[in-house]
Image: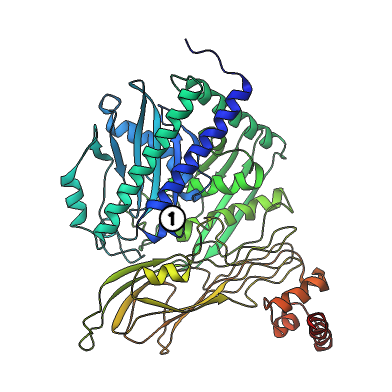
Amino acid sequence: MTKPLNLVAKQVMWNRMISVVEEQAQALIRTAFSTSVREAGDLSAGVYDPQGRMLAQAVTGTPGHVNAMAAAVAHFIRRIGQDNIFDGDVYLTNDPWEGTGHLHDITVVTPSFHQEKLIGFFACTAHVVDIGGRGFGADAESVYEEGLYIPIMKLAERGQEDRAFLNLVRGNVREPDQLIGDLNALTTCNEIGHKRLIEMMEEFSLSDLSEISEFILSNSRRATLEKIAELPQASADGEMTIDGYDTPIILKVSLEIKADRIICDFSGTSGLDKKGINVPLVYTQAYACYALKCAIAPEIPNNTASLAPFEISAPEHSILNALHPAPVALRHVIGHMVPDTVYNALDKILPHTVPAEGAGTLCNFQMSIRPRTDQVAPANTRRAEVLTFNSGGAGARPTLDGMNATAFPSGVMTMPVEATEHSGPVIIWRKELRPDSGGAGQFRGGLGQFMEVGATQGHEFDFSAMFDRVRFPARGRQGGASGGATTIARSDGQAMFGKGKQFVPHGARVLLEFPGGAGYGKPSERSPEKLIRDLQGGYVTPEDLEQSYGLSREQINAMERSILDSEQ
């Protein structure tokens, strides 16, 4: 019989489990083929008990994957069946409603056995560059057009890989080697997690995870409830208007803090869109929970119990609760705006707690590159799918400036120019911070970026835009100014749009200005020292100091002289 564990041992094992899944995530980054995983970190990893309850998640990853994946493993158990789970099995899906929200995310789940007994599961998710269909974009009018659908099924049974399934996948995607490589990476990282977990169990003479699971879940729930109990019991409404596809989208939330839970109801939110920007409820829940945890209990590790007190709902057939077969490929464009909508309400209950609005959604685009068709293309031209992740600025915080070119709430990293250019015949002609894009305030919003992209000689491409904040830039708080809006144009003067697939001919480039975060507090209260630093760093121009901060030309000249004197 296993001897009961003391509190110190339980806490050590809890920390060990977090480190196990972090190694699992790092292994995925090192072995994945897709740049979205290797360079941007668009992934998640976690460990679960035999009932499918998430016990620990990797620090590396994005909330949309992790918090959505918290509910996914229970679907796997139900679909596969308890009697059909064997040692050596590997399961997978990209079901948007039972995975993480769209077909481009593949979730792989592996049962973990110890001493011939099922002790839990490891799961991981990665965004793949291509899954077939129309390609990554908002243009589909149903999920059937968006790519290859993989129901919850076995990729391997008792260690035997399903070759027929892999051949089917290869025949339906544009980058088959890349996708199969990602599937192998997902499978391998779960294996690494399993090995490290077994090492820990043998070290502490554990036969199962029941005792440590109960410790993790009970303490996480208790700690979260204690944090909620400290808050005022009150309610407030929040609202945000964002670009949408053809018409603006309105997000509404009613937030209520009770003694033992927080309720977010998104009634009043816009209905389904005809294009692929709709959001399955699991993704809405993921980002609403994340927003609340960041504001209220950021130090409590993420698991099933720490997420449970946050109750998130949205009406069926609203844009935040899209049902099958709604198109959902770009669910992140809307879903990443959920935290700022929640904060619009929470700020009325807990002032000086949450940041101003930021860029929100990632500034993603995908280039489908091919040999030019207007004349004979050179022999060395080729086809390629290049997906790049970029960020606008984050909103200013109650005591700090916003972070430049930083993705909040997703946490996905901006991809290096070198990695993007290595992935296909693409040239990044310009990528730099965008002065004056951070909203003015006592604390300035984070800057967006300039970007200029094109294909190499002999190529043309389709540019799939996935942007927002074109018509509705980030709003400031407590008197702070709005951030800069998104702009998109073509080098030959042809108009372009913030969303949708658009043709770019040979020799033309796409010119992008990504949005800035909004300011916090009145601009008149920003200290002269910070304004001088902003001017010296090129974050603001003299014209912006005059227009946004109300400085006279004499004051600005004095600042410039002070900068020159300090450099001499």
Image location (x, y in percent) of residue 385: 31, 68
Q: Is residue 328 visible?
A: yes
| Front residue (pair 112, 568) | 568
293 relative position to 266: left or right: right
Image location (x, y in percent) of residue 75: 35, 36
Dot 1, how many residues are within 10 Å of its Cα: few (below 14), some (14-19), or many (20+)?
many
Q: Quadrant of residue 442?
A: bottom right
**How many numbered discs?**
1
Image location (x, y in percent) of residue 39: 45, 60
Q: Quadrant of the C terminus?
A: bottom right
273 relative position to 160: left or right: right
Q: Is residue 387 above or below residue 69?
A: below
Which residue is located at x 41 percent, y 31 percent? Answer: 52
| Front residue (pair 230, 85) | 85
Image location (x, y in percent) of residue 231: 71, 39
- Residue bearing mark 1: 319
Q: Is residue 124 above or below residue 398?
A: above
Q: Amino acid at mark 1?
A: Ile
342 relative position to 465: left or right: right
Q: Is residue 271 visible?
A: no
| Front residue (pair 113, 141) | 113
Which residue is located at x 45 percent, y 29 percent? Answer: 199
102 relative position to 168: left or right: right
Q: Quadrant of residue 527?
A: bottom right
| Front residue (pair 421, 341) | 421
Q: Is residue 17 above or below residue 41?
A: above
Per the image, label 1 sits on a secondary structure element best described as loop
Tell me which colouring the rendered structure shows. rainbow
Q: Is residue 392 above or below residue 325?
A: below
